[in-house]
Image (cartoon, coloured by chain):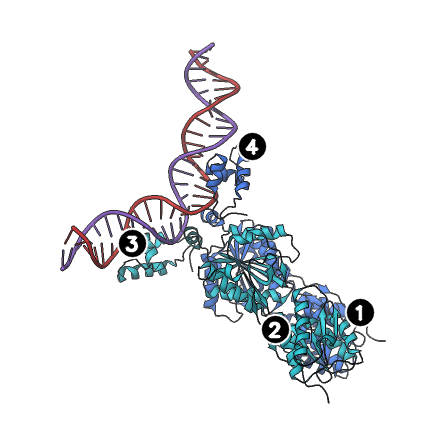
Chain colours: A cyan, B blue, C red, D purple
Amino acid sequence: MSNKNIGIKDVATAAGVSVTTVSHVLNEVAYARISPETRDKVRSAAEQLGYGPNRLAQALRTQRTGMLGLVSEDIATTPHAGRIILGAEEAAKARGYNLMIINTSGSASLESRRDDVEALLERRVDGILYATMYHRIVELPANLGSVPSVLVDSVAAGGNITAVIPDEEGGARTAVEALLAAGHRRIGFLNNTDDVPATRQRLHAFRTTLKEAGLDGEAAPVESEVSEVHGGYAAARRMLSRDDRPTALFCYNDRMAMGAYRAAAELGLSIPGDLSVVGFDDQELIAANLHPGLTTVALPHYEMGAWATEHLIDAVEGKTDLSLMALHPTILSCPLVGRDSITAPRQ
Amino acid sequence: MSNKNIGIKDVATAAGVSVTTVSHVLNEVAYARISPETRDKVRSAAEQLGYGPNRLAQALRTQRTGMLGLVSEDIATTPHAGRIILGAEEAAKARGYNLMIINTSGSASLESRRDDVEALLERRVDGILYATMYHRIVELPANLGSVPSVLVDSVAAGGNITAVIPDEEGGARTAVEALLAAGHRRIGFLNNTDDVPATRQRLHAFRTTLKEAGLDGEAAPVESEVSEVHGGYAAARRMLSRDDRPTALFCYNDRMAMGAYRAAAELGLSIPGDLSVVGFDDQELIAANLHPGLTTVALPHYEMGAWATEHLIDAVEGKTDLSLMALHPTILSCPLVGRDSITAPRQ
DNA sequence: GGACGTGGGAGACAGATGAGCAACAAGAAC
DNA sequence: GTTCTTGTTGCTCATCTGTCTCCCACGTCC
């Protein structure tokens, strides 16, 4: 219970040695030659007094705070932020670091982002994690560069900062392959309308994967709407009213899949009997709670947070050169989370 | 862009004054007598050099870090944590403080909680926020007491720590009153089975509110199940199969309400035409995306985080005495979030 | 007189702060 | 009209926060 008023010199007095010796013993300095008895005296004195080092003073002296800054967009509005934070926090804790959190808005001005980073720099964090809420290309404040930093779930406009992003294409491929493996040949895609990497890449992977399976990828039906439940509903209504109605749907995200569930229900189509569905995102609250459970592809938010933190710490400790990794973003795979929304097509 | 290598003495040299003067000017020390010209010189020198104070050194000297520790349970598993964090972060930022986050598990040992708090204390945070993921009675590590602290969404076993909690009874009353106001007289309650304050208090408010409306609260139907979608489904199936089927349902939380939606659909009951439903929690992802939108009662997570932070900072700055507030937990109200799941009963 | 074993002293990190020191002006004493 | 006191303005010096780390000191043994 580190009493805030007890310092190294109190321990020194209690143990009858100098502060230098206490420091040597407690930090297990390699070159220090101190007898085992003295070490014991110091250690027990420290424990009895409830001594805990003042990390501020240590940091001031050593130029290392053991703190990482995390500026995260829209912490509360998506569950994604929580998973990134958790991944980062656990990875940091495992290596003796702590996390300083700053929230920002996805639409915040460059100047306000700059101020956020500045606040972290004044606290002399050893490195900075910059996490966005969805995969895109972001413009980052220039002062980010003055300390090792890693971008989570986006790539930098300048392209000169190490980044981790999800494997959009691989994830889409995984989803479509799950449908193909179940025997489906007429597969539709409910896509998003935003101009973000995920929209383009998932569409590309959708077509390519079908083509590789010997199907006509270009002709496969795609309906685009905003990536919300009502968008998914609208897109699914159109898609399912076609003459050559697909037997399976790949949805841009779980929210759209939720809309598709409703559309299917209204049209008297049962899932997965009449229609198989795959989502994307693995938003527990939706995917696990729909009926039947939604098979979906998970975004590796936890993993990206942990990966970024690991490599950031490596860089801080001089074990890695981030500038080498900055050339290409690191891509983490999106695994399939199987539930009950896929089965073989009828007949 | 605070260059990490620029210190107060560089500014002093550039401005041609002493470091003392720079410190006086930049901190706007009240008793310092410095000419306007000198002040200008100092300020422009500081700006040109991109000087930013080293908060570590400041903190070491002033015994104030301007950092608050937040130990939060299960950051990623519920969206609730995100809202508490956001409330705390924004309140802290508004007053010039920053947040240091530590994640812990709801089932973590007392010793590991102690270590988490200890880590915060070593960093000399000015105060600590301790947030739990659902309203309950928690046992807290003893070292929490060595610095001002506030409990968010729980009360302490010893009862000697200032706490903010949601108004469970008021929220339940609000929900039931919304149903009564729509004209419902046969209202059922789908309750949770866990032995937590919310379970008891919401049930109590349910019965009391009915009684006050001249109905037989004791006789009103209650079905209890685990507070998940499938629990809500099972409870609703039983509830809706009764001879005196209620025309409205108050659900312990939005997840159970989601289960009730499915049960209603299976029984051919339309919402809200044949059955009105109110939830609890306001989990966006569910409540806003069900069809029809679920009217529900919101838990004030953002507000609790903000309230706790405000008062913690007040205590840190000597404006409040937390020990006085520790006598009774502060209760924040749970407002109704109206959507489309309530209407007047048929005929 | 080195080598070895054991330990301590004195900055340095970056900034905050109370006491104190020139410089000058106004008023008072001579 | 000069010197002395007193007061004010403007700024600086020395010291402090808690810890680390380079360098040195002392004694003993071969």
**Which type of secondary structure does the marked residue at label 2 adopt?**
helix
- Labelled pair 3, 1 in contact (Cβ < 8 Å): no
Instruction: Give the crowd class for mark 1: few <14, some 14-19, many >=20 residues within 10 Å.
Output: some
- Residue that label 3 marks: A17
A58 to the left or right of A181? left
Residue A246 occupies which quadrant of the picture?
A: bottom right
Q: Chain of mark 2?
A: A
CA separation in Å, label 1 and label 4: 68 Å
CA separation in Å, label 4 and label 3: 51 Å
Q: Chain of mark 4?
A: B
CA separation in Å, label 3 and label 2: 62 Å
**Which type of secondary structure does the marked residue at label 1 adopt?**
loop
Residue B145 visible in this rendered orientation of the protein: yes
CA separation in Å, label 2 and label 4: 63 Å
**Which type of secondary structure does the marked residue at label 4 adopt?**
helix
- Residue that label 1 marks: B182
Instruction: Give the crowd class for mark 4: few <14, some 14-19, many >=20 residues within 10 Å.
Output: few
Judge depth for marks 1 and 4 and give the one in front. Answer: 4
- Residue that label 2 marks: A170
